[in-house]
Image (cartoon, helix red, strand yellow):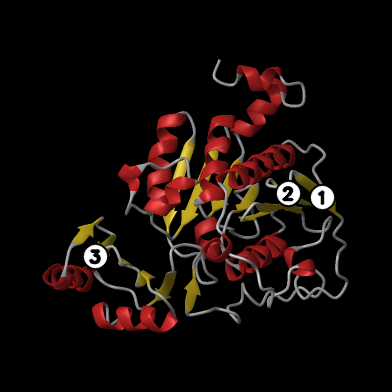
């Protein structure tokens, strides 16, 4: 009875619902877009959902990231999202991965073995071009459909990328593109939820082999503007035409990434063994207040340090972020 209203809809039906229940979706980034898309996927009965995120919940997230509440502040988003989604739908399988997706771990996390896919679709809900281009490389190479989404200010985009049938991300989005961010332009909660609704709707179409949108969708909720943009395949595209996967091969791996948040930077250091991480915790306890989540610690609300060597740092610029990392982590 849980999905009866969805089964009544003739484009899905009982057989379509069964197919959704056997489908697997990877959601990369569970911030404003990913958390809303994850909730919609869970409520729609997608049988297997993998959540991947490297960030933690902040107070400023709650304005638009409606899956979370004040009790989640400081928690890794992937962990908090899984906890909430399990309460929404206990009948499906949900896995959370608290990690920075990069060229070293993407194949291991998403698990492509002997060219056999165990997932049906990837939802790109990330906040930076480097990770988006990595997903693009991975999806094109392994022929896994993915749906690009973004939202800043009052504007949002959604685009289905199906290898061999549509353009890929690098056909039209350039590396040097100066894109607005939530830090510089702000963001309305209405646009993030609209984009997630459209992304989730397209996801169901693709999983059910229905006709999906071929154009890049652009929305401006402040102006009530909708534009469909035709995107042609670039015959000279370095990714889908020339099959050169620069981001997946690690040729374009940045040591520091600026995240879409309150002046948040990520720095990747060396992996801590159990003893080293315990020693770091004890050292930071003497220097200030820490919150211990076992595999990560939050220090003075400025640094979140993971046992894999990553650190999320609130800083005014890259220089200050590096300075704080060196001062308190020194890894």
Q: Residue furthest front?
A: 223
Q: Are marks 1 and 2 in contact (CB under 8 Å)?
A: yes
> Which residue shows up at 49% across the image and 49% down it?
51
Dot 1 or dot 2, earlier in sequence:
2
Dot 3 or dot 2, earlier in sequence:
2
Is residue 253 positioned above or below 210 on the image?
A: below
Q: Secondary structure at mark 3?
A: loop
Q: Are marks 3 and 2 in contact (CB under 8 Å)?
A: no
Q: Secondary structure at mark 2?
A: strand
Image x and y of residue 296, in percent: 29, 61
Which quadrant holds residue 19? top right
Which quadrant holds residue 285? bottom left
Q: Do we see residue 47 in this rendering?
A: no
Image quadrant occupied by the N terminus:
top right
Mark seen at residue 318: none
Separation (CA) of disc 1 from disc 2: 7 Å
Image x and y of residue 26, in percent: 57, 50
> Which residue shows up at 61% across the image and 77% down it?
249
Image x and y of residue 248, in percent: 61, 72
Q: Are marks 3 and 1 in contact (CB under 8 Å)?
A: no
Q: Do we see residue 166 in this rendering?
A: yes
Dot 3 or dot 1, earlier in sequence:
1
Is residue 287 positioned above or below 155 on the image?
A: below
From the image, tell me which residue sits under label 3. 300
Left or right of 279? Residue 305 is right
From the image, tell me which residue sits under label 1. 227
Separation (CA) of disc 3 from disc 1: 45 Å
From the image, tell me which residue sits under label 2. 219
Q: Secondary structure at mark 1?
A: strand
Left or right of 173? Residue 291 is left
């Amino acid at each position: 009875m849980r999905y009866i209203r969805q089964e009544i809809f003739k484009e899905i039906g009982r057989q379509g619902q069964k197919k959704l229940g056997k489908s697997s979706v990877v959601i990369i980034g569970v911030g404003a877009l990913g958390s809303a898309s994850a909730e919609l996927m869970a409520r729609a009965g997608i049988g297997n959902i993998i959540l991947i995120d490297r960030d933690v919940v902040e107070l400023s997230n709650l304005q638009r990231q409606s899956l979370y509440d004040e009790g989640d502040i400081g928690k890794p988003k992937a962990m908090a999202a899984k906890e909430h989604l399990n309460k929404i739908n206990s009948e499906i399988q949900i896995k959370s991965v608290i990690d920075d997706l990069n060229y070293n771990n993407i194949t291991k996390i998403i698990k492509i073995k002997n060219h056999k896919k165990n997932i049906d679709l990837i939802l790109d809900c990330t906040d930076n071009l480097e990770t988006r281009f990595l997903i693009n490389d991975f999806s094109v190479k392994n022929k896994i459909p993915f749906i690009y989404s973004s939202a800043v200010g009052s504007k949002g985009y959604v685009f289905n990328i199906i290898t061999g049938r549509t353009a890929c991300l690098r056909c039209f989005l350039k590396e040097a593109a100066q894109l607005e961010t939530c830090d510089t332009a702000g963001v309305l909660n209405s646009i993030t939820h609209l984009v997630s609704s459209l992304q989730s709707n397209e996801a169901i179409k693709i999983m059910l082999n229905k006709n999906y949108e071929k154009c890049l969708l652009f929305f401006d909720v402040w102006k009530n503007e909708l534009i469909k943009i035709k995107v042609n395949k670039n015959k000279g595209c370095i990714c889908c035409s020339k099959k050169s996967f620069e981001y997946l091969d690690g040729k374009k791996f940045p040591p520091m990434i600026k995240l879409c948040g309150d002046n948040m930077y990520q720095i990747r250091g060396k992996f801590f063994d159990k003893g080293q991480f315990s020693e770091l915790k004890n050292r930071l306890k003497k220097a200030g207040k820490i919150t211990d989540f076992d595999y990560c610690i939050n220090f003075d609300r400025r640094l979140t340090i993971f046992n894999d060597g990553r650190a999320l740092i609130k800083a005014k610029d890259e220089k200050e972020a590096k300075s704080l990392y060196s001062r308190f982590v020194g890894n």
